[in-house]
Image (cartoon, grey):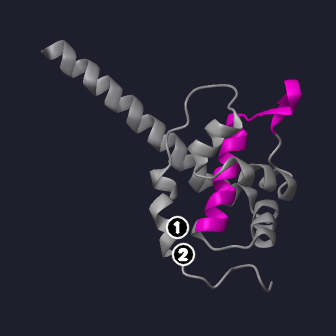
Amino acid sequence: MQGMKRNKDLSKNKRNSESELPIIPDKRYFTIGEVGFLCGVKPHVLRYWEQEFQQIKPVKRRGNRRYYQYKDIITIRQIRKLLYEQGFTIEGARAQLVNNPSEVSKSVQTDAVVKKLIADLEAVLQKLKMEII
């Protein structure tokens, strides 16, 4: 498939790699601003990706406000990884998500879970240290 990967230098995108994204909090719904922060993309990019990727389906409520769920954030992080870190075009990323959904999802979801576990363990460690003192 031609045109699936861009031939540009991706080193500048490494500074905001998957490992540097914040931990996803335990919430049911997230606003577009929160999702932008959690995924390292701006709200206008999220709105554009909603049009390009059918997998992103935020719930729309009062005044057409978007509310994203955990699965949406994972999907957005997958898309971000494909576009910004692996250099796929929109068309190529769309094909990857359709043809290999579990393969693409595994690394992103694993990163999110491991990051959350580390944060939880650090919190437990801090509590234990406080009890010792």
16 lies left or right of 87: left
Which residue position holds label 1? 13
Looking at the picture, which amino acid does disc 1 mark? Answer: Asn
The circle drawn on residue 116 is none
Segment tinted magenta in the rendering? 58-84
Residue 12 image point, x, y percent: 49, 71
Which residue position holds label 2? 10
Q: Nearer the viewer, residue 22 or 130?
A: 22
Element marked by disc 2: loop
Q: Residue at x 69, y 33 (%)?
A: 31
Q: Main secondary structure of the magenta part?
A: helix
Q: Residue at x 68, y 25 (%)?
A: 28
Residue 126 image point, x, y percent: 26, 24
Q: Nearer the viewer, residue 109 or 38?
A: 38
Q: CA distance from mark 2 to mark 1?
A: 5 Å
Q: Residue at x 69, y 58 (%)?
A: 79
- In the rendered image of this protein, does residue 63 appear above or below residue 84? above
Find out whether the residues at labels 2 and 1 contact each other: C-beta distance under 8 Å: yes
